[in-house]
Image: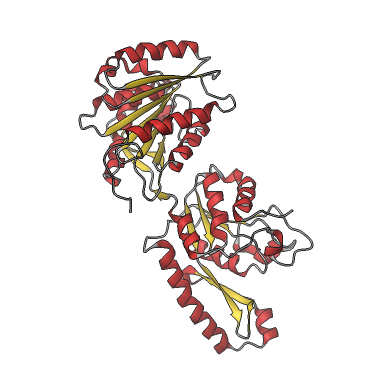
Amino acid sequence: MTFVNRLDAGRRVAAAVAHLRDEDVVVIGLSRGGVPVAAEVAKALWAPLDVGVVRKLGVPFQPEVAMGAIGEDGARVINDQVIRGAHITDRELADVERTERVELERRAHIYRGGARRLSLRGRTALVVDDGMATGASARAACRSARERGAARVVLAVPVAPPDWTSRVGRDADEMICPQTPVDFAAVGQFYEDFAPTTDREVIACLRHARPEPGGIPVEDLAGGQRTLKGELLVPVGATGVVMFVHGSGSSRLSPRNRMVAEAMRQAGFGTLLFDLLTGEEESDRANVFDTRLLARRLREATDWLRERHPELPIGYFGASTGAAAALWAAAERDDDAIAAVVSRGGRPDLAGPRLSAVRAPTLLIVGGRDETVIELNRRAQERLRCETRLTVVPGATHLFEEPGALSEVAELARDWFLAHLPGAAGGSGAVEEAA
């Protein structure tokens, strides 16, 4: 089996690490070739991406032969067997390491642009490379992750020799590799395209999406303080942020909302998915259907987002009962902070008398076979006084599970936000590039 390129390899690795989806994961791509692979893994896991800068320590008179590797945080792996066989002195090793340490620090600064590294404290560090031969670089990256406080270190590569796990040893808690061929000689033999990855490509992968802290402070039902779990991803140059408001029985992990969110990011928007309630609050089913409470939480999350990105216009994407909360919250904003609203299979009728106060342009999307909800949306549309459109997706049921139905929802939502968020293609005004 061969891989077409590093993107293909990344998708294969992503399938092999799917069981990590619900963990608090940070994906670390080894520079340089491991970063494009890791970018595909991060995308599939909906996880933040960072770079693990490592440098091979080559034998002075035969630099392609590794006598060890170094990573950030002082991580260091030495191959004593190679050093003895090549008769490398301590001074020669120190000279090579000094030179490579300078280059390591230079590249780390270039790749991150001076930004701080993502915190690994208490999280799962998923170290990804485009393949493994000796294992020195991978081990250095794993040791670096451990030094940074990772609770668990997982190493994943698309191809490696059969004895690869023994080479890694205890530097990783879990090791994943889809392919360990007996005829392994070099990583490149298993790629159709194994062209060197450039610094420009590494930087492009890292800047595709910028992860932000997702702990959203809110007031709880007793007047105290709680924190909601959220996931904020803002592409560099984003022209707006779409906040996702899930329906009853769902959460920020909703696969349907995640699919739509990916389409929004591809269109140049940031996305924020978050839980509207804490686990304790969700245990009371009355809270799940309390539109007033959910709208209040949405407003608090909106304020949190505006503090971090005051330059970006905001749109709401509400699903099912979440659509009512989105419209309720939009109606109560008196500063035009919400530029547009999209409802997927929503219950806008639950927003009741608030509908007439909504000013944000609103798109109502309903499945053609969801007859009861179609009628509820038609009645709600009559009460809306803003620009509004009702679009029926033929043959779709309430959850849009039919082939192509959810993709059509994503396209409709994308076009609505592009047309109505200031600064987006087709919208009015301009917005500065996010830092």
Q: Dividing the image into 4 quarters, which one contains the C terminus?
A: bottom left
Give the residue at x 32% y 30%.
340
Asked if residue 408 shows in the view, the reply is: yes
Image quadrant where residue 162 sits: bottom right
Which of the pair 206/425 is nearer the observer?
425
| Left or right of 59 in this view: 410 | left
Return the x and y of residue 54 as percentages of the image width and height. Answer: 53, 68
The answer to whether 98 is drawn above or below residue 414 in the figure is below
Image quadrant where residue 337 sits: top left
Here the colouring is secondary structure
The answer to whether 99 is drawn above or below residue 193 in the figure is below
Return the x and y of residue 396 as percentages of the image width and height. Answer: 54, 20
Return the x and y of residue 7 as percentages of the image width and height. Answer: 59, 52
Image quadrant where residue 136 sits: bottom right
The answer to whether 418 is drawn above or below residue 45 in the figure is above
Q: Residue furthest right?
A: 182
Q: How many marks?
A: 0
Asked if residue 290 shows in the view, the reply is: no
Give the residue at x 57% y 87%.
92
Give the residue at x 43% y 41%.
267
Q: Residue furthest left?
A: 334
The answer to whether 363 is drawn above or below residue 1 in the figure is above
| Left or right of 45 in this view: 82 | right
Return the x and y of residue 375 as percentages of the image width and height. Answer: 42, 10
| Left or right of 301 in this view: 12 | right
